[in-house]
Image: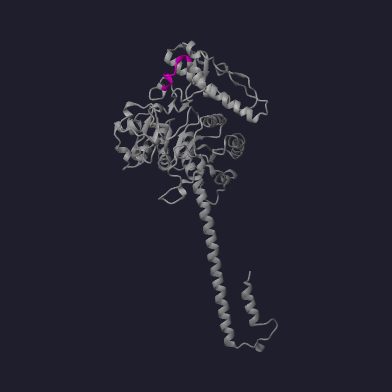
Amino acid sequence: MQNPSLQQRRNRIRPKGAPSQGNKYSKSSLNVNEKKGGVSAFLLFIFGLILFGGLFYVDHITHSNIRHRLHIPEGDNYKMSKQEAELYKSNSNAAYSNDNLHADDGRMYHLIFSTDCSEFQHWQSYLLFHTAMKVKQPGTVTRIASGCSEDDAVKAKKWHKEHVSDVFGNHFILHLTPHFSGVKDKDGKTVGDYKFFNKPFGLKHWLEIGLGFAENSKTKLNNEDDVVILIDPDMILLRPITGDFSNDRDVVIGKENEKDRKLKVEHGSPFAQKYGLGAQWRTFNLHEIAGADSPAKKVTQNDANVHYPVGPPYIGTVRDMYAISQKWTEFVPRVHKEYPYLLAEMYAYCIAAAHLELPYQLIDSLMISNTGAGGEGWPMVDKIPHEEACDFARHPDHSKYAVPSVIHLCQRYSVGDWFFGKRKMTKDFFECESPLMEEPPSNVVVESDYKFPPGGTRKEIDTKTAQREGFMVCSITSALNEAAVFYKKNHCNGEGNMEKTLNLAKLK
């Protein structure tokens, strides 16, 4: 389209229908005006190109930034799905910067856990949310759900809003991420699936997109003094988790971890549960995984055993956890390539911490899981009076008897004929029609000297084992029922099934 102002100037130079010899302008002035008109048109053309180019550049940078932050591939042939386009908008939450959520110690805590979008982890997530609400966990509680289909993402967001954030509070959050669990070969082709990739990549995605950590200047990063608590979805809280471990009553710690003991989570001083990983990661090809000059290669056997056999709950400042997430996501594919097994992501975490020279303060009492294992919070459970074990487990009160921070539901638990195993759990438990769990009698610990899990054989057990197994069965069963009753009272219009008839030991 011709420039209107240029056309007007031309009309003034030569009126329509007027003969050239009748024009009042001289030839010299006509030439000057024509030259001026040509220059103006040229300048306007150049200005238009610059403006168009600038707008295109800004648009490209904006979309590239969103693509980068969402881990979306570049290229004209790639189109953002509806889910991916909505991720960026739906994952920010004002609760992360709500000053009213600070704990009594003045700090902001973010408890997070990584899941996929399966029904199996759906019921675990609701149970975890409910126990966090029950113990009054300070700060925010976020489920990081990775790899949901578009339909599943829509359903998950709707269900979470109606059943979690609208009821528990908007500091109980759902954060969606793309699919991270694909195993790729050297050419970038997906050749397998390792679902535990979701944990490191989900952590990094949440820190950048949900918390907005990487957006501000490098000198004072967003929320860097906040504390992140990374746990697993199959964990339930018995008491709040914070960054203060200064009260000896609250802490069980191994003798090897008492030297130069840290008391509080600070920058450069992360905490974690001690796991039986030992120093096996030192036998991996650290040159290929972490680089020729990695500090991880200089860690001694003793330091590896004292500071790095870590697992969830992991607790660290946002600054430290972001540094961990960067190296964890870098190292975990390489570790999995060398060691394609369940614990690859945990060993990769150990290597990332060692590479960053972030020695952990290990705590035994952050978790109980395996009733026969050392290095967990079982000394606390063992001190509970035997005759009170089951009733106390149903309603744990840390002010009465000290309890560990979380139960990790990763084993099978059995006392007498009573049993719990998460793989046997019905996936529709948190529905109006589903019955509640049948609960063991209060004297089950005192009266049971054997265990008889489904598909197993009857086995005699001693008093200590009965105490530990009974504590787990009674505690988990009660936690499930309390969460289910809460669900039914809030969502079933008085018609929820309150019969306690579900017995996992009797399920086929």
The answer to which of 110 and 370 lies nearer the viewer is 110
Residue 21 located left or right of residue 125:
right
Where is the N terminus found, in terms of image quarters?
bottom right
Question: Residue 312 location, x and y as percent?
Answer: 43, 32
Tell me where residue 428 sits by quadrant: top right
Question: Residue 462 location, x and y as percent?
Answer: 42, 12
Residue drawn at (58%, 80%), measured in percent from left and top? 34
Question: Residue 112 location, x and y as percent?
Answer: 49, 36
The question of residue 13 being in magenta is answered with: no
Tell me where residue 159 sits by quadrant: top right
Does residue 319 appear in the picture of this structure?
yes
Residue 151 located left or right of residue 385:
right
Q: Is residue 324 above or below residue 407?
A: below
The residue stretch that appears in magenta: 380-387
Would you say the magenta stretch is mainly helix, strand or loop? helix
Q: Is residue 27 above or below residue 449?
A: below
Residue drawn at (52%, 43%), measured in percent from left and top? 98
